[in-house]
Amino acid sequence: MNHHHRPRLACALITKNAGPRFAEVLASVDWVDEIVILDSGSSDDTIEVAERAGAKVFQSEDWPGFGPQRQRAQQHVSADWVLWLDTDEVVTPELRQSIEAVISSEPDPSIAYEVNRLSDFFGRFIRRSGWYPDSVVRLHATNRYHYNDALVHERIEVPKGKLKSLSGDLLHYTSDDYRGYMAKSLQYADAWAEARHAKGKRTSVAGIIGRSFWCFLRKYLLQLGFLEGRHGLLLALQSSHYVFNKYFGLWVRQNKLK
């Protein structure tokens, strides 16, 4: 790479009914060279918001799962490097500065970068309960890395010694919409149960209850959720409810009650 070439940077997102914060999300990356969006059948104003922001919008007829969908989106990226965002994540000025410093420094394409997510839970940013820093790999050379094939909780796998951290937080607004939050939680639990069942995993009623209760204790006591006040209590309860749904979904499948 010569000294006059600054790598081009894309921001890539996969969307379906992106939600109320989408315009703010796109505005937080209006400094990148291209915004690439792969949409899978939005029925709200997602496409219009994306086009107003100058994004390149592509359509997907089906839904193959999160990992494969991100792989598809990456095929539309023409820039040298790609920054991945979800439709409820906002890049802070500090994080932008950190990303721009990397891109302008003739970065090594074998190095990928992780960011710290600071997540909002119904009106409070949570720094305990095991929620922070919630590091996720989000910046990499386009032709070097990609998401794995996981249908849910997909990730970018980076070899040991090839991962660096960016400074500044990625603000994660998980809960702008209660109905959407609960629907997504159930969708994730169902996908998890489907994948575990396919691998021959099993559970019991005692296992469902025990794992749910342990999740509550871990979040609220061991991970200091009680210091987050009522939000910490409700987060611990909601987390244990999610664990209950995961294992209940597995139990239903193994008993062929689906």
Image (cartoon, rainbow, N blue to C red):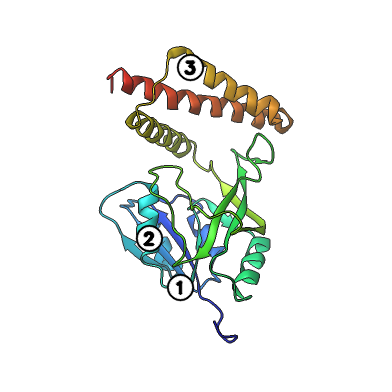
Specify which label sits upstream in the sequence, 3 or 1.
Answer: 1
Closer to us: 124 or 214 = 214
Q: Pointer 3: residues within 10 angstroms few (<14), some, or many (20+)?
A: some
Point out residue 208 in the picture as x, y percentages from the top left corner.
47, 18
Q: Quick one: quadrant of the C terminus?
A: top left
Q: Residue at x 36, y 67 (%)?
A: 76
Q: Is residue 45 visible?
A: no
Seen in the image, is 187 located left or right of residue 212? Answer: left
User: Which is more foreground, mark 2 or mark 3?
Assistant: 3
Alpha-carbon span between mark 1 and mark 2: 13 Å
Whichever of labels 1 and 2 marks the residue nearer the N terminus, that label is 2
Task: Identify residue type, mark 1.
Answer: Ala
- Reading the image, the residue beneath label 2 is 73
> Three-letter amino acid code at disc 3?
Gly
Instruction: In the rendered view, tell whether residue 193 sits above or below residue 209.
Output: below
Residue at position x 44%, y 27% in the image:
246
Residue position marked by numbered label 1 in the rendering: 79
Whether label 3 touches label 1, CB < 8 Å: no
What is the C-alpha distance between the residues marked 2 and 3? 38 Å
